[in-house]
Image: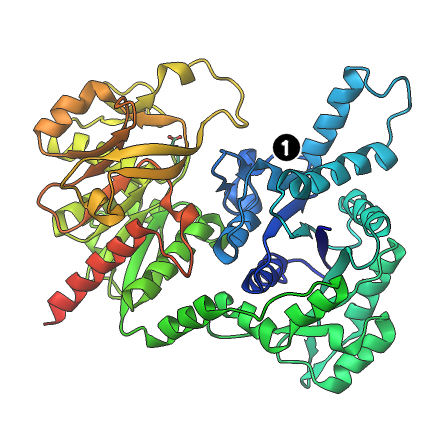
Amino acid sequence: MKKYIFVTGGVCSSLGKGVAASSLGALLEGRGLNVRMVKCDPYLNVDAGTMSPYQHGEVYVTGDGAETDLDLGNYARFTSGPLSRANSITTGQVYDAVIRKEREGRFLGRTVQVIPHITDEIKGRILAVGKEDTDADVVIVEIGGTVGDIESIPFLEAARQLIHELGRGNAISVHLTLIPEVAGGELKTKPTQHSVKAMQEQGIQPDILICRAPIKLDEATRRKIALFTNVETDAVFTSYDIDTTIYEIPLVFYDQQLDQVVLKKMGVEARHANLSAWYAMMEKFAARKGKVRIGIVGKYMELHDAYKSVYEALFHAGLACGVEVELAKIDSAKLEETQDPETILGKAAADGGVDGVLVPGGFGQRGINGMVKAARWARETRAPYLGICLGMQIMVIDWGRHVLGWDDADSSEFNPDSKHPVVSLLEEQVDVKDYGGTMRLGNSESLAEPGTKLMAAYGSAHIWERHRHRYEFSNKYKEEMTESGLKTAAFTSNGSLVECVEWPDHPWGLGVQFHPEFKSKPTAASPLFRDFIAAVKSRVTHQEV
Ligand code: GLN
C-alpha cells in the first residue's frame, strides 16, 4: 500500500515548507524508501511559466519541459525521485481540465461543482503520481499557501477526503507552523494552536507538527502544544534557526527522530537510516577554506528566489571545490549606467570587486547593456565567466559589437530592427502568439566538441540538460563569429543549433544555451558550475601567490 503524506503550512508563509517537505523526503530515502514529491499550488495560472520572477521567484523547469514552482527545485536538490509535469498541480490546471471535460459533455448533464468535481480532479492527479509509478512507496504532497487562505480550500478538502478514504496510517498530515518570539525572549504557542484549529475546521487533524522557532523547543513547550492540538508530544518537532546551510535540515530532523515517528504513524518497517551522503556533505561544508566572490549580473537582484537554482548551484560548486562562494548580486541596470565597469566589478570597487562573473537567464530588454558590459569586462580582464541561456546570448552580442565591430549587434528580442541580429528567433517560433509553454523547453541532448572546456567539465560529448528559451545563436553569423575566434563548443544533436560558445585564449569563459543549475545537488554539483568555481579559485590563489 502506498503511503501519502500531506504537508501543509499555517500562521504565515515563508516558513520553509518546501525545505521541510524535501528534508522529510531525504530522510525517508535514507531509510530505503522510494519517495515522490508533489506540489499543489493554489494559484490560477496553469503553470509558473507566465509569472514574473518578482511574483513567484524562479520558474523551475523539469526534464519533460514543465515550467513549475520553485519548490520542485528543492525536491530535486534534496531527493532523487523523478520529477515531471505530473508532480506540479495548480488550480489553473485543475479548473482547465474540469472545464474542458464539461465542454466535452463528459459530466452527463450534472451541475459541475467545486465539490466533488474540482476535488475529484485534484485527488485523481495526486493518486496518479503513486499509481503510475509502481516503484513509489511514499508520496509527499505539499499544499502551497497557508491554511485559512480561500484559494487552498479545495486542496485541503481533497486531502481530507483522501486521508479518510485511504485510512489513517495510509495518509497522514504534517503541519508546519511558526512559534514566534516576543519581546523578552518568550516563545509563543498561540498562533500554532490557532493554526491547528484552522486545520481541524477543514476536517484534518494533523498527526505531526513541525514548528519553526528561533531555538529548539523544550519538552514543556512541546507538551503544551500537544495538549492544545491533539498531537502527541513526541510528534511535535522544531525546525529551529541554523546558521550553517538549509541542507543540514534533514540532519536536524533526524536528530529529533522525525523519520521514526513518521514511519511509526504509517506503520512502515524500514531499514536503518543511511544518511552518509548528508553527513559527508556537511563535512565538506565545514572543511571549506577561503572565499571567492562571484558577481551575478542580472535584473531581479532584490529577490533571492528569482535566481534560486543558480545560487544553490554556486553553493554546491563551492562544496565541491572546498571554497566558500560569496554572492555579489549586481543589478545590471546599475552597470549599464556606469562609464567604467571596473568601478563595480574590478579590484577598485568599494567592496573589492568580483573574482568571476555569472550572467543568468532572463527575458526582456531592461539591463541588457549592463550584462554586455559585464561580459566584455570578464573577457578583457580574463575573469572566469559563466553565461547561462541569456548569459550565452550576451556573450554573442558582446562579440558581435566589440570584436566584429557591429555596433548594433543584438538579439532580435531586444532590438527587432538591428542590422546584425546575432541572436534571433527560429523560423518555427516566428508565428507563435501564446506565451504559456511555447518556448524550447526541457531536456535535450547537446553534443560537445572535443577539446572544449565544456567537454572537459562533463567528461563526455553527450550532455543532457534542460532548456527554456525562444531565441537562438543566429547561424547566419556563425562563420564570421567563428572565423574571428569565438568557439562554438556544442551543437544540438542534429547539428543545427549552437548550444555553447567559449572565448578563445581565456582562462574560462563559457556560455551555454541550456540551464545546468536545475540538475545541481549539494551532494553532486553541476559539473559546469564546479569547473567555473574551480577556475575562479585557481585564479584567485594564483594572484595571491
Ligand atoms: N530571453 C532569452 C530567450 O528567450 C533567454 C531566455 C533565458 O535566459 N531563459 O531566448
In the picture provided, is 155 more to the left or to the right than 295?
right
Give the color scheme: rainbow, by chain, secondary structure or one colour. Answer: rainbow
Q: Secondary structure at mark 1?
A: loop
- Residue 512 placed where, x, y %? 29, 39
Q: Does 62 appear above or below 526? A: above
Instruction: Tell me where residue 499 appears, x and y as whole percent.
Output: 28, 32
Residue identifier under label 1: 46
Q: Is residue 64 above or below residue 275?
A: above
Q: Is residue 354 left or right of residue 2?
A: left
At x 18%, y 30%, the residue is 400
Q: Please tell me whether residue 176 is drawn above or below residue 95 in the rendered image.
A: below
Q: Nearer the viewer, residue 31 or 488?
A: 31
Residue 486 visible from this viewpoint: yes
Q: Residue at x 82, y 70 (%)?
A: 193
Q: Outermost residue toward the right?
A: 110
- Quarter of image, res 125: top right
Q: Is residue 377 visible?
A: no
